[in-house]
């Protein structure tokens, strides 16, 4: 596994912009910082999985990128739904946290699989 530092920094910038977008959508909400920070972290983690690393085996790269892309879409939909419908703190934290932990666990297992 070899990091691509330029793409990691680019992912950080893109997730910061996405976090700002979530902030501007929820500016009148009392918990605006919660969705801003959680949205930035979740989008950053999946963007790094999409483009931030190069793996020795091509099969690992394809699988990790595909899974990260699917979770990126899930995180974006999750954050947009809670931004548009209204932020309920407990369900947002539980759903987003579960998605993030499932993503991290599956990615860990995929990376450490010996084929």
Image (tube, helix red, strand yellow):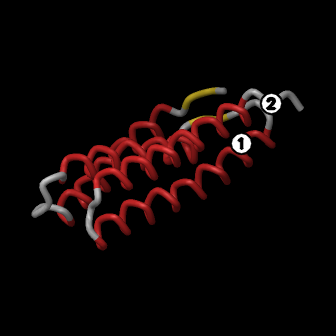
Front position in the image: 108 or 3: 108
Residue occupying image coordinates x 29% and y 59%? 88
Q: Is 60 drawn above or below residue 113 in the view shown?
A: below
Residue 70 horizontal/vertical position (percent): 60, 58
Residue 68 in view (yes/no): yes
Q: How far apart are marks 2 and 1 (CA)?
A: 12 Å
Please give the label number shown on residue 52: none
The answer to which image quadrant residue 71 occupies is: bottom right
Outermost residue on the right side: it is 115
Is 102 placed left or right of 39 in the picture? right
Front position in the image: 55 or 100: 100
Q: The N terminus lies in which quarter of the figure?
A: top right
Bin the neighbour count of mark 2 within 10 Å (Cα to Cα): few under 14, some 14-19, many 20 and up. few
Residue 74 horizontal/vertical position (percent): 52, 60
Residue occupying image coordinates x 42% and y 49%? 43
| Front of the two marks 2 and 1 | 2
Residue 14 in view (yes/no): no
**Mark 2 lies on residue:** 113
Residue occupying image coordinates x 67% and y 40%? 106
Residue 34 horizontal/vertical position (percent): 25, 47
Residue occupying image coordinates x 20% and y 57%? 23
Please give the label number shown on residue 61: 1
Residue 94 horizontal/vertical position (percent): 43, 48
Label 1 SS? helix
Label 2 SS? loop
């Amino acid at each position: 596994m070899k990091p691509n530092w330029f793409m990691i920094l680019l992912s950080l910038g893109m997730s910061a912009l996405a976090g700002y977008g979530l902030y501007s959508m929820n500016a009148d909400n009392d918990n605006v910082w919660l969705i801003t920070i959680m949205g930035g972290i979740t989008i950053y983690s999946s963007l790094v999985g999409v483009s931030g690393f190069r793996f020795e085996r091509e099969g690992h790269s394809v699988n990790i990128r595909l899974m990260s892309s699917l979770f990126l879409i899930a995180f974006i939909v999750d954050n947009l739904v809670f931004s548009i419908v209204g932020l309920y703190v407990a369900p947002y934290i539980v759903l987003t946290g579960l998605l993030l932990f499932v993503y991290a666990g599956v990615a860990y297992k995929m990376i450490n699989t010996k084929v």
